[in-house]
Image: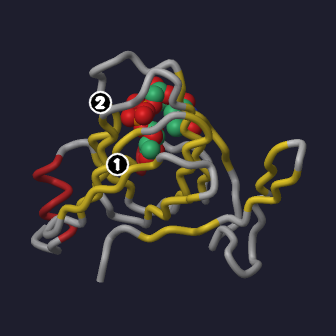
Amino acid sequence: MSLVKWIDFPSLADSRGSLVAVEMGQDKAVPFGIKRVYYIYHTEQGVSRGYHAHKQLKQVAICLAGKCRMVLDDGTDREEAWLDRPTKGLVIGDMVWREMHDFSKDCVLLVLASEHYDESDYIRDYETFQKMARKTV
Ligand code: T46
């Protein structure tokens, strides 16, 4: 099964421009209750972010402007996806290592999260993550 799962948000476009509504619990909606929203922007050229997994956190990442490349890794398989349009939400589940690369100068990455910020939920060491993901610890 692919690690890359998208939600396609309908764009409500008319002569004035476009609007996307993000909802929970509907068809084509975010599959969890949203407790936190954050966004990443003004990322310096050549900088990568992430390099961690979460024990219990579901997220949807939407690139509102520009683009970036997300790498997802479940401890066995590694896939990548370009976030490059505001109508595509990348669903990132529990226990998935993520890295973000190749941010364009104008990139604004919005993230919807199922839990409040909790540093103890982060796994920041790849080997530890891999052992936990493969249930060898
Ligand atoms: C993730 C990827 C996609 C907070 O105080 N509250 C928050 O809600 C967040 C997300 C971060 N922080 C603090 C923790 C650090 O001192 O902001 C600083 C930067 O966070 P971090 O280095 O974790 O940022 P990224 O871009 O590496 O990762 C973030 C999220 O932390 C992470 O959950 O999945 O974006």
* Coordinates of residue 14 in the picture (x, y in percent): 87, 53
Q: Please tell me how crowded label 1 is: few (under 14), some (14-19), or many (20+) other residues with Cα within 10 Å.
A: many
Relative placement, left or right, of 50 versus 57 is left
Give the left or right position of residue 72, taking residue 42 as reference.
left
Q: Residue furthest front?
A: 15
Identify the residue shown where x is 82% and y is 44%.
17
Q: Are marks 2 and 1 in contact (CB under 8 Å)?
A: no
Is 50 on the left-hand or right-hand side of 19? left
Indicate whether 29 appears above or below 20: below
Tell me where residue 4 sits by quadrant.
bottom left
Residue type (three-letter) at the residue carrying disc 1: Met
Task: Indicate the amino acid at tag 2.
Answer: Ser
Q: Secondary structure at mark 2?
A: loop
Label annotation for residue 48: 2
Camera-side residue of 48 and 120: 48
Pointer 1 residue: 70
Q: Secondary structure at mark 1?
A: strand
Location of residue 20 in the rendering, given as x and y in whole percent from the top left corner: 77, 55
Residue at screen point 78% across, 65% down: 23
Evaluate whether residue 119 shows in this view. no
Disc 2: CA contacts within 10 A as few (<14), some (14-19) or many (>=20): some
- Residue 124 badge: none
Choose between 136 and 44: the one closer to the eye.
Answer: 44
Instruction: State the quadrant of the C terminus.
Output: bottom left
Q: Quadrant of the N terminus?
A: bottom left
Establish whether ligand 1 lies closer than 8 Å to the Cβ of label 1: yes
- Residue, x 55% and y 57% (percent of image)? 60
Q: Residue at x 29, y 48 (%)?
A: 123
